[in-house]
Image (tube, rainbow, N blue to C red):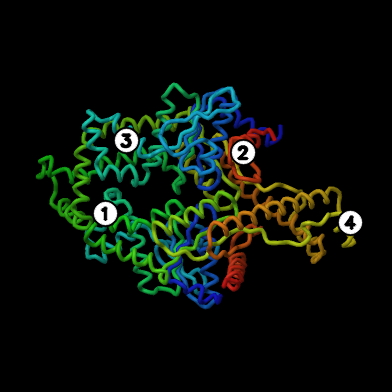
Amino acid sequence: MTDAATGAAGLTDLVTTSRIIICSGSGGVGKTTTAAVVAMEAANVGRRAVVVTIDPAKRLADALGLDGIGNTPKRIDGPWPGELWAVMLDTKSTFDDLVTTYSAEPEQAERILANRFYKNISGALSGTQEYMAMEKLYELHNSTDFDLVVVDTPPSRNALDFLDAPKRLTRFLDHRLYRVIMAPTRGVMKAVNVAAQAFVRQVSKVVGASVFEDAVTFFQAFDGMEAGFKDRAEHVLQLLTSPATSYVLVASPKRDTVAEARFFAEKLGEADIPIAALVVNRMHPHFTDELPEALRERSETFAGSDLGGLYRNLADFSLVAHREEEHLAGLAQMVEPAPVIRVPFLRTDVHDLTGLALVGDHLFGRS
Amino acid sequence: MDPAQFFTASRLLIVAGKGGVGKTTVSATVALAAARSGLSSLIIEVEGKSGLASMFGVPAFSYDEVELTEGVRARTLTPDEALVEYLEDSDMSRISKRLMTSGALDMVSTAIPGIRDILVLGKIKQMERAGLADLLILDAPAAGHAISFLQSASGLADAVPIGPINNQAKDVLALLGDPERCQVMLVTLPEETPVNELVETAYQLEDRVGISLGPVVVNGLYPPLTGLDADPSAAAEAAGASLRPGEADALDAAATFRRERMELQAEQVGRLAEALPLPQLSLPYLFDAELGPAQLEQLAASMLDGIGGLS
């Protein structure tokens, strides 16, 4: 088998057997497209697949029939024996659902949902989007409607934000500072040290009293729900690190994105998470085995003529191809024994299902 | 246009665009081109490691300012660091350490979204006021975040009606709204999705932030080349050379690929010009293996050429 065929076979295997596939990598490398194509392939082999996308480019969203409304999967019709569903992550609704699930009574949920501080958490607290992406994944995985859930991770500098996010939020909700804030209302003033009180007063002087009251009201309303959240976060984390979950690293062959991909691979490795496949998008074509230096020399011999220009051009692309393979070599070694799948530069961006299918042909070795 | 006049059109230039389009490369190019025009510049990084140091061939830097090359300095600026400075300046240095270690910034920034951004922008405003260089270049966060980043001031001015944060937000708004102090330089690749997103970002920045937009930079255009339309065998004959076996096909396939890519690029550049009536500057795609000082020099020369051609 050729390398390309081995790679494609490896990926096909994943699509056929995994319960969860997480596509991770830095921004702008085609993660969302890759996730959508992987889910589509699962539908092709007869499985019921759902892809969770985060902030897709508009035309891709259109291709998937996502209009940004709602937080529930929509079915995409196509010529596959299985099912293909797509959902665009709505961070706030997902969080709202969680609050509703874990509140002791409807009034508690209402109080929280109406609170301004809560609205800020669901919109602005760093890591919330990552957490909700994983929460959505957990929810879809647990429903009996799907055999495979494919997610693309939010673009983030920190490779493991999505693994860290659930813990981060529970840490946030459990912060000792809140106990300080809450203390006066709980009547345990004497337990709170004077310095902490002074600190809180000073902070509230800077940010304004009303802002502070919102926070206090939130934590009062939230009181008692931390345990449920923590528990859930624990389950999500277990699922993410279980063998049912496969990680596909997506990259492009540019030097800086390969560097970021290596960083991702390293971090996943440290967390004992194996990479199941490496997809490299936007590879330049390989036109010749001749070395760029030799071609460059010939272009200089014939400088000024058409032939000189043609050699120069071939030299340019030979250089790019060599450079891309050089960048990838180290990365491929790092993710061993994971297969490496190379997807060429495509003429146009993905506009519709036909475009997705075309990427699929490259990804799964049919072209 | 005279480059010196171009680079001093505003004191602060915010370089923005979606991830992967080459914002940092463009920031470095602007800085070097300004230096070659006799102006000093300071590049401000807000997202940590970026490869800026290696482009100039110097060791990695951080919060402390470093010289990248003559006339070009750089430093990073993070919300945490800006907060400490802010608190120290506002006579609250005693609590700054606690805020940092207790993770309280997380809570404060949740209570008031945008506070991290305003801390950074406030610090930049202060640097602009201090006249630290002829030109300050901010290598902005990636596109989606760039809008909320720049919008933080107007949001906060409303959310926090009085006090130091309100003052800070108002000062930043004044900076962002003054075209003589601040402009945005948007960067894109000559490709469909990046162009679409750039156009969207441009209108959002104008409508929601009210910030003035400078020229757009199209990064990574294939440079023109003679002979791409020629038939390899005929070209060889004309040059009195003979091709090796298989070479004609390789030359032809590579030329066809380049021609097609160049057509697609031209199409996108045209689309951008139509959708966005802003002057365009372009930077060539570099086939070289590394982006180092020599390549940066090439890009800066290319940018200076482009500026010379602007009216």
Q: Is residue A155 left or right of residue B85?
A: right
Circle 3 chain: A
Q: Is residue B149 left or right of residue B7?
A: left
Instruction: Please state, as top left, top right, bottom left or bottom right, where the N terminus of chain B lies in the image.
Output: bottom right
Instruction: Please state, as top left, top right, bottom left or bottom right, where the C terminus of chain B lies in the image.
Output: bottom right
**Residues marked 4 and 1 touching at CB (< 8 Å):** no
Q: In the rendered image, which residue does mark 1 sit on?
A: B159
Q: Is residue A128 visible?
A: yes
Q: Between tags 2 and 4, which lies in front?
A: 2
Label at residue A96: 3
Crowdedness near tag 1: few (<14), some (14–19) or many (≥20) residues, C-alpha within 10 Å: some
Q: Between tags 4 and 1, which lies in front?
A: 1
Crowdedness near tag 2: few (<14), some (14–19) or many (≥20) residues, C-alpha within 10 Å: some
Disc 3 residue type? Asp
Q: Between tags 3 and 4, which lies in front?
A: 3
The kind of secondary structure element at disc 2 is helix
The kind of secondary structure element at disc 4 is loop
Ranked by sequence position, the earlier of labels 4 and 1 is 1
Q: Is residue A294 visible?
A: no
Residue at (43% x, 28% y) in the render: A140
Disc 4 residue type? Ser
Q: So how many labels did they put on this image?
A: 4
Residue B200 location (% of width, % of height): 48, 53
Q: In the rendered image, which residue does mark 4 sit on?
A: B242
Q: From mark 4 to mark 1, how far is it between C-alphas?
A: 74 Å
Residue B157 location (% of width, % of height): 28, 58
Q: In the rendered image, which residue does mark 2 sit on?
A: A355
